[in-house]
């Protein structure tokens, strides 16, 4: 990740799609692994670990949406609804059948994936705006069904208390233990996504994104791959929903409103469409943004605005303004997002200090 | 009150249709932009919201008469939309649909934050001077604001139809909608007509803001009305003004039926035996359900243009 190449030496497809472009990349990955698995849990305080946990959950969801939006080019404004599906599936399994997390986690994902296939079905016939709106409809319909079916939502207020996950008899209830739990899932999510992107499936997705009719002529089963993209993306969303449920201890549909779907779209766009690294950047950025705005407003705000009530009102609206402004800014000025900025920096340093 | 009486059914349907016409008015703003510039505007509801908030805040906090406030809002919306087109949407011409959808979703979030920040997030009433007493025809009770709204919407649809059919600018706008390159070759200044389309959408938004604002009060939730636009335009077809009216009426009537008949039915034991759902609120998602069904069978809506794609 942080190595410098001295030029372009790729001579085969195999080397172009290799996970480790150079032997030194293994050291970089090992370094990151040590940083996040050993150093962070030991040194970072509990409050910052909660933020890291939220970032981790967002990364899983954003990678999933990125597979759909960035790789396959199919828009979905119902991502949060799939998280909701995953969350309630896991909550019901965990409370009614006392199933451990290693069953509820994939089960939540699979449930979300099967709903995702149903929701994605219109994508076989329609695209662009029509698909956007039918996924928007899915958000409302799924939400309504969950809230209004006591068998799923657990009745009043639609929230279910979920027991903490246990590993080998040990209950994971501190932020540090939850951090390790989420981190493992995040790593699996990243590795799987990287491998999907460079394999036959990922290439088919990219072909469909770039020109779906041409892809069909090339022999790609567009229908199957579109549905597969929906399934994979919803699986990720479901897993993220399950993680959030275990993280907060409650499954509640109010965690997953339409705004969250838009947050995830923003993560993918701000981070950079079509790359896993971009999804990670985007998820980190969008999760940290409200925290940063809050911090700035509490430290600087009182000097500008006297009234505390007015200040807190402005604070909550400021987030939307900055957020919407950033989405527009990135789309107009830098459509490839933070990932492109990162790549620009890298390619600048590739032959530095020489000009070429 | 007898739920199954004919007059009650007629009353529900007419009130629903009138509300539907008010939805159609907002949908018109969406259709105008989509027809001529191919841009998909997810922020139409927010346009309605900001113009409503502006008029109501000027009236309530600064004592500006509503007529003056409406003119201020009109001028502001036109200028705002022209700038928006110039700064955000023109650089994005030719980009994937997904990007334009996202840009307007970003715009929606931006407006939803900015206007309450400036004018405060309190709910205000917007009094257009329309009486509250129901209009009674025989046994049918109609809500006056809905009647006025429906009438205004119909008048505007008539005016827009004449504009598109008869006036020089309207014909040019239809040409632009049909094909950008050909109209450019015919000597039409396409970009100027983009500006015109966005300004007209601004005008429609102010009207919608006034009507909806006085119907349900003015605050951030006014933008939720914008979400109803999507079933309307999908049902009617994206490029069709007639489609917007028909779609609007369908959505309005379905909503009214859902609220009056399906919601109470859902509490009945015989219903709950088959569908163990709780509570009502079907009117919020019935239009979407209908829309999905229509999408399966007629993907381009009832009056939409069927696209034939070539590689």
Image (cartoon, rainbow, N blue to C red):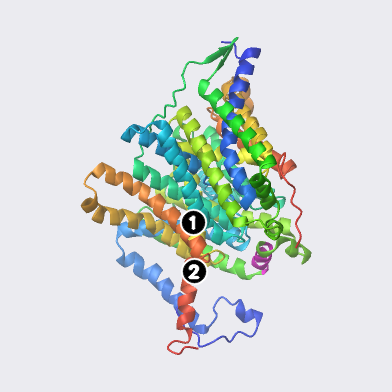
As for residue B280 lying within the magenta part, the answer is: no
The image shows residue B162 at horizontal and vertical percentages of 66, 37
Q: Residue at x 29, y 45 (%)?
A: A312
In this rendered view, identify the residue nearer to me: A124 or A337: A337
> Which residues are drawn in magenta?
A200-208
B228 to the left or right of A284: right
Marker disc for residue A339: 2
Circle 1 residue: A266
Res B27 visible: yes
Please, which chain is the residue tagged with disc 2 on?
Answer: A
The image shows residue A345 at horizontal and vertical percentages of 45, 77
B42 to the left or right of A286: right
Q: Residues within 10 Å of mark 2 (few under 14, many from 20)?
A: many
Q: What's the distance in space between the residues labelled 1 and 2, CA to CA?
A: 14 Å
The image shows residue A144 at horizontal and vertical percentages of 55, 36
Residue B47's place in the image compared with B247, above or below, is below
């Amino acid at each position: 990740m942080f190595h410098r190449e001295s030029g372009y030496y790729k001579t085969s497809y195999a080397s172009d799609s290799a996970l480790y472009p150079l032997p030194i990349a293994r050291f970089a990955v090992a370094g990151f692994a040590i940083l996040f698995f050993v150093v962070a849990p030991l040194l970072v305080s509990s409050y910052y670990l909660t933020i890291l946990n939220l970032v981790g959950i967002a990364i899983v969801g954003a990678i999933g949406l990125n597979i759909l939006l960035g790789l396959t080019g199919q828009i979905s404004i119902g991502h949060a609804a799939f998280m909701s599906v995953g969350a309630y599936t896991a909550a019901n399994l965990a409370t009614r059948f006392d199933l451990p997390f290693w069953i509820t986690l994939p089960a939540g994902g699979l449930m979300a994936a099967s709903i995702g296939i149903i929701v994605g079905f219109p994508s076989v016939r329609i695209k662009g705006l029509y698909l956007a709106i039918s996924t928007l409809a899915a958000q409302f319909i799924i939400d309504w069904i969950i809230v209004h079916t006591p068998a799923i939502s657990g009745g009043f207020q639609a929230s279910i208390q979920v027991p903490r996950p246990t590993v080998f008899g040990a209950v994971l209830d501190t932020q540090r233990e939850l951090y390790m739990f989420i981190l493992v899932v995040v790593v699996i999510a990243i590795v799987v996504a990287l491998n999907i992107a460079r394999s036959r499936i990922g290439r088919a997705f990219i072909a469909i994104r770039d020109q779906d009719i041409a892809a069909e002529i090339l022999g790609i089963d567009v229908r199957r791959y579109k549905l597969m993209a929906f399934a994979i993306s919803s699986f990720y969303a479901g897993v993220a929903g399950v993680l959030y449920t275990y993280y907060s201890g409650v499954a509640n549909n109010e965690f997953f409103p339409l705004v969250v779907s838009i947050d995830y779209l923003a993560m993918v766009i701000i981070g950079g469409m079509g790359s896993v690294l971009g999804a990670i950047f985007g998820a980190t950025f969008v999760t940290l943004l409200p925290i940063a705005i809050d911090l700035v407003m509490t430290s600087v705000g009182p000097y500008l605005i006297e009234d505390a009530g007015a200040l807190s009102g402005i604070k909550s609206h400021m987030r939307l303004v900055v957020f919407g402004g950033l989405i527009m800014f990135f789309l107009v000025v830098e459509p490839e997002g933070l990932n492109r900025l990162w790549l620009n920096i890298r390619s600048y340093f590739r032959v530095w200090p020489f000009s070429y | 009150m007898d739920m199954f009486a004919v007059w009650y059914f007629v009353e529900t349907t007419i009130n629903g249709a009138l509300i539907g016409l008010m939805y159609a008015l907002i949908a018109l703003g969406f259709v105008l932009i989509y027809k001529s510039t191919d841009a998909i505007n997810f922020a139409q509801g927010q346009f309605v919201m900001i113009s409503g908030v502006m008029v109501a805040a000027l009236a309530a906090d600064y004592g500006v008469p509503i007529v003056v406030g409406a003119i201020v809002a009109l001028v502001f919306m036109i200028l705002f939309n022209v700038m928006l087109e110039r700064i955000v949407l023109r650089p994005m011409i030719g980009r994937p649909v997904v990007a334009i959808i996202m840009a307007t979703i970003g715009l929606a979030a931006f407006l939803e934050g900015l206007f309450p920040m400036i004018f405060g997030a309190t709910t205000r009433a917007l009094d257009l001077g329309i009486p509250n007493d129901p209009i009674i025809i025989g046994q049918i009770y109609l809500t006056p604001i809905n009647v006025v709204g429906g009438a205004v919407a119909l008048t505007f649809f008539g005016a827009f139809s004449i504009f598109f059919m008869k006036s020089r600018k309207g014909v040019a706008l239809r040409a632009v909608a049909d094909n950008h390159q050909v109209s450019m070759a015919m000597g039409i200044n396409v970009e100027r007509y983009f500006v015109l389309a966005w300004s007209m959408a601004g005008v429609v938004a102010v009207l919608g803001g006034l009507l909806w604002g006085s119907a349900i009060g003015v605050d951030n939730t006014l933008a939720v009305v914008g979400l109803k636009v999507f079933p309307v335009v999908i049902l009617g077809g994206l490029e069709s003004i007639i489609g917007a009216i028909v779609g609007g009426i369908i959505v309005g009537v379905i909503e009214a039926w859902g609220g009056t008949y399906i919601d109470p039915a859902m509490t009945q034991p015989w219903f709950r035996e088959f569908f163990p759902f709780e509570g009502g609120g079907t009117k919020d998602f019935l239009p979407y359900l209908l829309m999905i069904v229509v999408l399966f069978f007629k993907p381009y809506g009832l009056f939409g243009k069927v696209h034939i794609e070539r590689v």
